Amino acid sequence: MQAKGSKGQLILAYETAYGQTPSPASTVKLPFNKNTLTAKQTLTEAQTITGRRDAAVPVRGKVDVNGNLVVPMDAKFIGYWLKAMLGDPATTGSDTYTHVFKPGDSMPSLVLEKGFTDINAFTLYNGCKVNQFSLSLGGDSELTASLDILGAKETLGTASFAATPLDLPLVRFNHFQATVEENGQVLANCTGVDLNLGFGLDGDIYSISGQGCRTAISEGPLQVSGTVEVLFEDQTLLNKAINGTESSLKITLTNGDYSFELLLPEIVYERTSPGIESAKGILISLPFKGYYENNAAETSIQATLVNDVASYAME
């Protein structure tokens, strides 16, 4: 029987030590749209002279665990990815909880298991970290986020390592539930926002005793960037870009009592004046960079998630 993507499964757990599966594992079953996480090991042609014209046995190289996950933007599961990127949140409340995430000095490493449940084939990836996060707002499609993953090693199995993973109901956010504020004011003429978070992971750390696997994945400086697209009704944002005027950006998604907020307290726009490409209305797209210098939140990015999940500790 051929494995079907519709029967795929994604399990997450946080490692207590890099590259080691926690035991007993506290796990969660996550929804996803796409999972291309794989391990690759190159074969290099050997140059050894054997006295024959036949090719020598090829040399096996390093193991490269990497791939992309596309996940739905939702009010509950996104907290596990926020913890993977930014660390443990500060959580307050009862019944309804507010989780505030800010980037720390390090990132937790993950166990991610890709399951082909219809043929009892499971692939466990240790030492995983999020290298990049991307979110695009605007349009009429399903609202999803993209995560690029680096990992250490791959282990094949015929049964899942997660006996009873936590399985929560999915509460989606949609494009029409978004609000964008620029410098504290609602940006009513905004047609789209692209946001990219880069975590600068070093994927080139392979020690001699590591059996060809990554023995560490160190974090680099956080990179916050994106693009704001608005109707070209005046030159307000363009003037900010020309003058290098500091601003801020806040994206809020709301579904009933649940909400997700991304705050960029300090941004500056890149100067990009609009062209005229057709007889239709003109849009202006302004790239931006986020940073921390002296804002009250003391961070370059802050994510606030309000839901009924009491904790993301998973201990």
Image (cartoon, rainbow, N blue to C red):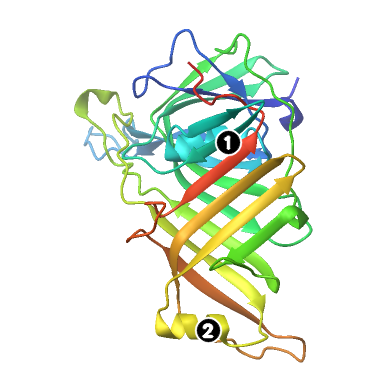
The residue where tag 1 is placed is 98
Q: Is residue 28 left or right of residue 278?
A: left
Q: Amino acid at mark 2?
A: Leu
Query: Residue 76: x, y in percent?
Result: 65, 33
Judged from the image, the secondary structure of the residue bearing numbered disc 1 is: strand
Q: Position of residue 284 (x, y in %)?
A: 61, 80
Residue 130 location in percent, x, y? 45, 40
| Residue 25 appears left or right of 114 | left
Alpha carbon distance from label 1 to label 2: 35 Å
Q: To which quarter of the image does residue 118 belong?
A: top right
Tell me the number on the disc at residue 73.
Answer: none
Of 285 and 260, which appears nearest the observer?
260
Residue 73 in sight here: no
Query: Residue 68 versus residue 185: which sits nearer the camera?
Result: 185
Q: Which residue does the numbered mark 2 point to in the structure image?
A: 238
Kind of residue at disc 1: Thr
